Image (cartoon, coloured by chain):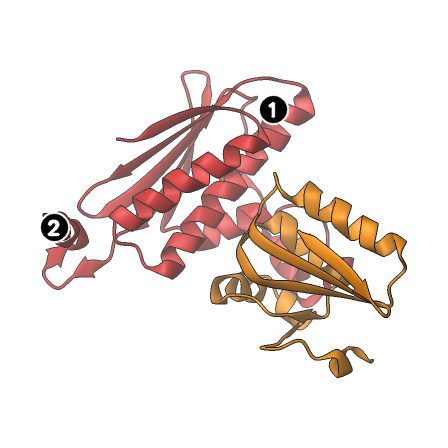
């Protein structure tokens, strides 16, 4: 299960994106699903760095873990910033702004809105002194076999 | 990010990733270009592979967008497509409002 432990800084966004893109490719996600997942993880990691660590002058790591099984690709992001549950963020106000021109909109919430749109399941827990966000995307099914089997066949 | 100003029209070309880490570079370049007081700012983003929400806010000044399908999809998700025009080729005439 590939895991990256990186400092809670904006320069960590690129290696996290690279990990997600690589695992999405191995999991057989299509171009659209891959982009959406990468967007979701990038927005969450950005929030952790900016709102979790930087705004509170706090140092800490982001741990990104990707697990691919026969059905799902699961990304887990963990941090040691103050407890914050992104699944409870109200995004109704974000959606209401979509009819407004960009310059009249409220700032904030757009990233979390993308996360909700992008993945099949989005969970949060406070575990062992850490924030843990879990994003799950279902893998495409190729015929009667899973894409994993098909991907493994291609590697042989 | 590269930029040039050509008879009142500022051209900004973006490539690679526009995320929260690279957005400040883009902002600096926009401010540099804005100091020259161009009448129009055109962003060329067809070589931009990725744009996070941090980048969408920078499109406030933008009227025409030529971008890849995924970035257009992101803009459509947010209703930003109502604020900009998607084009296949830059059309100077369409900027006159």
Tell me which residue sits at (25%, 48%) in the image: A27
Q: Can residue A93 be seen at all in this image of the molecule?
A: no
Chain A, colour shown: red
Q: Which mark is residue A53?
A: 1
- Tell me which numbered mark, 2 or 1, is placed earlier along the sequence: 1
Q: Determine the secondary structure under disc 1.
A: helix
Give the quarter of the image for residue B23: top right
Q: Can residue B28 be seen at all in this image of the molecule?
A: yes
Chain B, colour shown: orange
Q: A113 or B73, which is in the foreground?
A: B73
Q: Which residue is mark 2?
A: A149
Quick check: B80 above or below A71? below
Left or right position of A78 against A25: right
Q: Position of residue B2 (x, y in %)?
A: 69, 54
Chain on which label 1 sits? A
Tell me which residue sits at (65%, 60%) in the image: A96
């Amino acid at each position: 299960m590939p895991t990256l432990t990186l400092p809670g800084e904006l320069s960590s966004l690129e290696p996290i994106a690279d990990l997600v893109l690589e695992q999405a490719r191995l999991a057989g996600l299509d171009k659209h699903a891959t982009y959406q997942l990468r967007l979701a993880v990038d927005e969450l990691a950005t929030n952790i760095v900016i709102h979790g660590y930087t705004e509170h002058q706090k140092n800490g790591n982001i741990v990104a873990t990707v697990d691919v099984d026969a059905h799902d690709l699961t990304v887990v992001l963990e941090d040691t910033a103050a407890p914050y549950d992104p699944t409870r963020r109200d995004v109704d106000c974000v959606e209401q702004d979509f009819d407004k021109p960009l310059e009249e909109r409220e700032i904030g919430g757009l990233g979390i809105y993308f996360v909700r749109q992008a993945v099949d399941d989005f969970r949060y827990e406070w575990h062992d002194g850490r924030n843990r966000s879990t994003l799950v995307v279902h893998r495409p099914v190729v015929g009667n076999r899973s894409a994993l089997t098909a991907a493994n066949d291609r590697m042989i | 990010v590269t930029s040039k100003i050509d008879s009142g029209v500022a051209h900004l070309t973006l490539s690679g990733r526009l995320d929260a880490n690279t957005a400040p570079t883009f902002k600096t370049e926009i401010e540099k270009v804005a100091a020259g007081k161009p009448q129009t700012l055109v962003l060329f983003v067809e070589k931009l592979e990725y744009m996070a929400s941090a980048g969408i806010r920078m499109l406030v000044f933008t009227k025409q967008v030529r971008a890849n399908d995924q970035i257009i999809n992101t803009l459509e998700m947010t209703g930003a497509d109502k604020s900009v025009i998607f084009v296949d080729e830059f059309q100077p005439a369409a900027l006159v409002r």
